[in-house]
Amino acid sequence: MNTITYFTLLLSFFTSALSGPSNKTAHDPQPAYGCTTSYDPALKLTVYTSVEKDPEYPGGADAWGRFVNRNLNEANLDANVDCNVKIKMVIDSAGAIRKAVAIHGTTEVKDPNANEKEVIRVYLKSGMWQPGKCGGNNVTAEFTQSFTPCIK
């Protein structure tokens, strides 16, 4: 190695060491943005509310669509109530569903209507999910999904 190459490598090492952490890149194993958490008193768990990768059904959207088509019971739906259902779920770091509730805005529904009950039933029947990720690690994560189980 010649003197100039050696000096350049040494200078780049000291420059990066003195300048502190660098900007994040796509190859950096750390989160691209900060994951946030909150404490869920009902579950007695710290839950990530913002993650790098949301939990997802194994096999992705196509597999989820097939599961819903096989398991949604249209006889349990009521076309006379709102067909737009929003669900908040908590998936633990192993992929198990810890919580599935209907929400209106950000408020959990205490007395779900027929459509909300059917959607929750389908979600709870879905089994294990791929957990959310933060910093490359599986975490207990909360996420919301919209679901329209009926067509008016």
Image: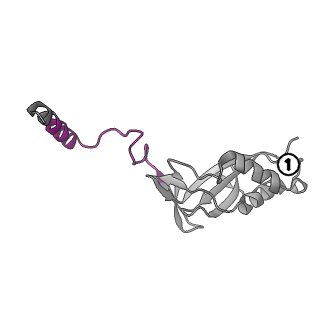
Between 110 and 125, the one lying in front of the other is: 125
Identify which residue is drawn at 72% across, 62% down.
124
Residue 23: which quarter of the image?
top left
Membership of 103 in magenta stretch? no
Residue 21: which quarter of the image?
top left
**Amino acid identity at mark 1:** Val
> Where residue 36 sits in the image (x, y, percent)?
47, 52
Indicate the colouring scheme: one colour
Vertical position of residue 114 compared to residue 12: above or below: below
In-image side of 45 versus 20 (left or right)? right
Identify which residue is drawn at 43% across, 44% down.
33
Identify which residue is drawn at 69% across, 58% down.
101
> Where residue 78 sits in the image (x, y, percent)?
88, 51
Vertical position of residue 106 compared to residue 128: above or below: above
User: For the residue carrying disc 1, how many other residues have a C-alpha within 10 Å: few (<14), some (14-19), or many (20+)?
Assistant: few
Segment tinted magenta in the rendering: 9-36
Between 77 and 39, the one lying in front of the other is: 77
Asked if one can make out residue 105 in the rendered structure from this viewpoint, the answer is no
In-image side of 121 versus 30 (left or right)? right
Instruction: Determine which residue is flagged by label 1.
Output: 81
Between 28 and 112, the one lying in front of the other is: 28
Residue 132: which quarter of the image?
bottom right
Q: Quadrant of the N terminus?
A: top left
Which structural element holds mark 1?
loop
